């Protein structure tokens, strides 16, 4: 059946599907492969869900996502009109690509970066041109100062974890006032400085963040954009023309509970940072090579064993990390998400066992 | 600020935003304007939410939405590979438009129909051509038998509520084997016969349904497509290239509880049908003109008062119905969703009061 050629196929759009990170169904594994937070969501999220008015589900949610927009605006000290909320940062990025990257000139992003950028560009037929990272996996700001149709990069970058200084980010934004510059800050809460303070100074800046990592809400799908109210309006117009009601009632209410608990947020983030720094030391002791990471993962390679081999050996022992076979330049690296202290201790012990028997 | 012209605006996509139906924040209103179900979701949905494992929210949901896909497949006796699930029927329709309507020839849909079809076509730059309904608001099947890039229509049609026979639907599908035909069955459960039995006979057919109306889950955002596994695969490829994780964990689990409770589903649907038939009689007695409706709304005009006036008078009395000012041909009609018996009794009494004082 799958190989039958149907009459309608010439009229269909065919894309090379993106493969999301593995979500193993096994229990009792140590899951360090999708940058999830090892700690549960804020206690207020549990209260919202346990006390949820289920009868209200018969009615559509608020298409403006007003309560959650307002809560995010309060926490980040911006206006409601400067916030756009969607179904995870992938959704808000897809909407931003569709709205803001509408030029004939290529958009620019790093050659080693979040693997979805070229997928969206291909899907939405947006021309693009990748810029090589330097030999230490750092973005070269000058590469983003030529004529283009828009700029996007993550900060810290993925999967490298390398942070760019706010000074360099501002240079890129300032050099591109005629296009939109998107700073994708999925991992910024783990020690980086956000560019969100620049949105009042630069009307061409969008800052994207997510509840999936630092707020332990990957399973609820909440992402947002902060930016000039006029771009936010244009993105909302596109969203209303695509799917007016994206955020369900449970996501809206639990999102409010999540974002307003700053104490719990800081506590979890600091625990992850502390565990990350501990893990860095252990990796260094074992001869691993990596750039400093300001995210909730470490992108590292061993000087003793190939990336693929180490990935497989860990998996055999029920520890899942992420390995990228392409491009070749990174295929000896593993992206290791930061788990709990106990998980990272077990990870290091397992590493020792693998390296000894190698 | 909103009137400032920025340097980046030439590179932005601007669309005329779709305006979703009003979601008034007032309590104690009778809300008959967005075709919501007056009854709560299935009891199993409440159990799922009250007992939800909130810790699991720190992890991404299953991108394949496997449990819900499987539950839908079981209920409708199709294969898992023949089911695509998304964030309401708007999401699955947007994905289907993006995937399946990729020809240079115009897609065809009725001139009076779901108001999102032309919005998606404009946004996604899909050429389209509308076909006029006949004088009684019926779709003329022969209009959909000329060269085209795809066909879509709701059955029953919106906002008319008029049902097309399965025989005529099959004729349209059979005449269009080289393109995809989408039958949008948002309202089919209220007395129509679904085309889903034809998906094994016609590989070019997609049937779209939603949990928003007959399953009282508008606030949870769940829609699905049934179709040939090869088209479903293509749509999934596009979905994975747009946003891999669309359905949050609560939506997936509560969706399973909703779709598997056939007894409760039948009970609610039958109550709505009974109330609709009662309401039809009352409207007829009062001189209203309408085609027979097989949906959870009635599209009717008074012989005594204009649509706009009646809409305003009802609103003043806290009863919200839907009025479409365009096209002119329908601007004397109101789309009245079916509420509870008590709500419809109150609606009829209010109608009498308005008509007497007119």
Image (spheres, coloured by chain):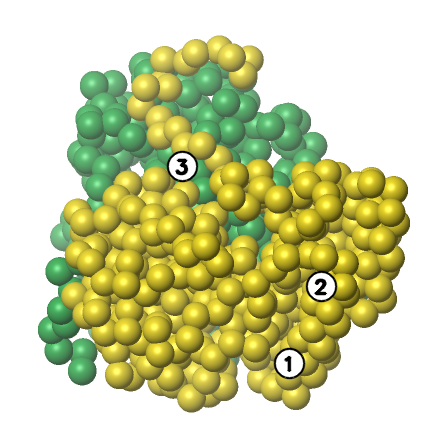
Chain colours: A green, B yellow
Q: Which class describes the residues within 10 Å of circle 2: few (<14), some (14-19), or many (20+)? A: few
Q: Distance between the residues labelled 3 and 1?
A: 39 Å
| N-terminal label among 2 and 1 | 1
Q: Which residue is drawn at 35% across and 26% down?
A: B12
Under circle 2, the secondary element is helix
Labels 2 & 1 near each other (Cβ < 8 A):
no
User: From what the image shows, is residue B91 above or below residue A165?
Assistant: below
- Tags 3 and 1 touching, CB below 8 Å: no
Residue occupying the point 20% across, 35% down: A128
Q: Which of the chains bears the disc numbered 2?
A: B
Disc 3 vs disc 1: which is toward the camera? 1
Residue A155 image-quadrant placement? top left
Q: Position of residue A180 (x, y in %)?
A: 36, 25
* Quadrant where the C terminus of chain A is found in the figure: bottom left
Instruction: Say above or below: B171 vs A176.
Output: below
Instruction: In the displayed orientation, state which residue is furthest to the top.
Output: B4
Q: Report which quarter residue B55 is drawn in.
A: bottom right
Per the image, the residue denoted by label 2 is B284
Residue at which label 1 appears: B265
Q: Where is residue B119 in the image (x, y as percent from the top left)?
A: 41, 43
The numbered mark 3 sits on a residue in which chain? A
**Where is residue A82 drawn, in percent x and y?**
57, 28
Q: What element carries label 3?
A: helix
Depth check: A87 or B323 in front?
B323
Q: Can residue A249 be seen in this view?
A: no
Q: Mark 3 points at which residue?
A: A96
Given this view, does label 2 or label 1 mark the residue nearer the observer? Answer: 2
């Amino acid at each position: 059946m799958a190989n039958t050629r149907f009459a309608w196929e010439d009229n269909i759009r065919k894309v090379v599907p993106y493969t999301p990170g593995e979500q193993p169904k096994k229990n009792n594994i140590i899951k360090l492969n999708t940058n999830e937070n090892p700690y549960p969501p804020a206690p207020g999220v549990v209260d919202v869900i346990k006390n949820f008015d289920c009868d209200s589900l018969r009615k559509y949610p608020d298409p403006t996502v007003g309560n959650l927009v307002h809560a995010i605006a309060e926490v980040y000290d911006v206006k409601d009109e400067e916030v756009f909320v969607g179904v995870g940062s992938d959704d808000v990025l897809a909407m931003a690509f569709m709205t803001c990257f509408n030029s004939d000139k290529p958009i620019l992003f790093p050659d080693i970066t979040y693997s979805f950028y070229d997928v969206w560009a291909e899907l939405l037929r947006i021309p693009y041109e990748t810029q090589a990272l330097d030999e230490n996996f750092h973005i070269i700001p000058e590469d983003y100062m030529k004529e283009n149709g828009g700029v996007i990069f993550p900060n810290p970058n993925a999967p490298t974890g390398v942070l760019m200084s706010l000074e360099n980010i501002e240079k890129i934004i300032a050099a591109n006032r005629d296009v939109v510059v998107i700073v994708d800050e999925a991992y910024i809460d783990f020690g980086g400085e956000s560019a969100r303070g620049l949105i009042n100074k630069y009307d061409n800046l969008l800052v994207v963040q997510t509840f999936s990592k630092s707020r332990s809400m990957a399973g609820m799908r909440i992402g947002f954009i902060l930016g000039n109210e006029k771009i936010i309006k244009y993105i909302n117009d596109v969203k209303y023309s695509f799917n007016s009601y994206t955020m369900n009632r449970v996501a809206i209410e639990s999102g409010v509970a999540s974002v307003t608990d700053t104490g719990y947020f800081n506590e979890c983030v600091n625990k992850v940072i502390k565990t990350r720094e501990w893990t860095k030391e252990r990796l260094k002791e074992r001869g691993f090579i990596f750039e400093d990471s300001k995210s909730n993962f470490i992108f590292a390679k061993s000087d003793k064993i190939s990336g693929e081999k180490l990935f497989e050996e860990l998996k055999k022992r029920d520890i899942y990390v992420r390995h990228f076979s392409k491009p070749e330049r990174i295929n000896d690296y593993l992206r290791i998400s930061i788990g709990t202290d106990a998980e990272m201790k077990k990870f290091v012990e397992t590493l020792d066992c693998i390296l000894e028997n190698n």
